[in-house]
Amino acid sequence: MATKLVQWITALVLFASVWSAFVFDLVPVQLDPRIKEVIVPLPVYLLIVFACFSLATIGYRVATFNDCEEAAESLKKEIEEARKDLQEKGFKFT
Amino acid sequence: MATGMDQALGMGLVAFAGAIFSYYTIWVIFMPFVDDDHVLQQFFLPRFYAIALPVVAGLIFLTFIGVFVTAVTLAKKKKSK
């Protein structure tokens, strides 16, 4: 299997060639002008869809973040204890 | 569990992304098949803007990223000098 980059570039080039064929009328098929109106903005549309998906994923992960406050507090306390302990033993903190 | 504020913000972002997706999908994919005298047409700008607005927004976004990276790089250089 080729690398991920090669896979992505292959898929992109394939999509670009099919899209260009339809947009620049290189296909022998007679297209309904309305279908053409949908195909022309397709790259921009797919970009926007990807952007929306990314935004939604980020928002969802923020909303469902597994934040454990008691664990955070106890961890901070342990860090303080370790810090004091090491300082007594002569460790120099910047 | 994320805090209440975080949950509200997160779900708000999801709703916002969903709204943009829905409006843009209807605009680009469905409107060409809607008659010119249908009542739905009044909610959507001419199709020229379906490409122009994202392109302009994209350029603004890239400019913002460029300015941000430049600013942070300069600030760091000044600090380490």
Image (cartoon, rainbow, N blue to C red):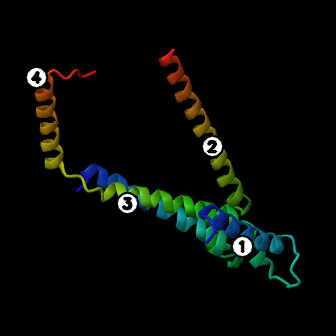
| Residue displayed at 45% across by 60% down | A56
- Answer with mark 4 or mark 3, whichever residue precedes in sequence: 3
Residue B44 in sight here: no
Q: What chain is tagged by disc 3?
A: A
- The chain carrying label 1 is A
Residue A74 at least partly seen:
yes
Q: Amino acid at mark 1?
A: Val
Residue at the spot of label 2: B62
Position of residue A39 relative to residue A91, above or below, is below
Same chain for the residues under marks 4 and 1 in the image: yes
Q: Residues within 10 Å of mark 3 (few under 14, many from 20)?
A: some
Give yes or no for contact between labels 4 and 1 (Cβ–Cβ under 8 Å): no
Q: Label 3 sits on what residue type? A: Tyr
Q: Provide the residue designation for mark 1.
A: A38
Q: Which residue is mark 4?
A: A88
Identify which residue is drawn at 64% across, 75% down: B30
Chain identifier of the residue bearing label 2 in the image: B
Q: In screen coordinates, is A32 left or right of A62?
A: right
Real-space Cα distance between discs 2 and 1?
Answer: 26 Å
The reply to whether dot 1 and dot 3 touch (C-beta < 8 Å) is no
Distance from Cα at disc 4 to Cα at disc 1: 72 Å
Who comes first in sequence, dot 4 or dot 1? 1
Q: Quadrant of residue A93?
A: top left
- When the figure is inspected, residue B20 is found, relative to residue A26, above or below; the finding is above
The residue that disc 3 covers is: A60
The residue closer to the viewer here, B42 or B70, is B70
CB atoms at circles 2 and 4 under 8 Å apart?
no
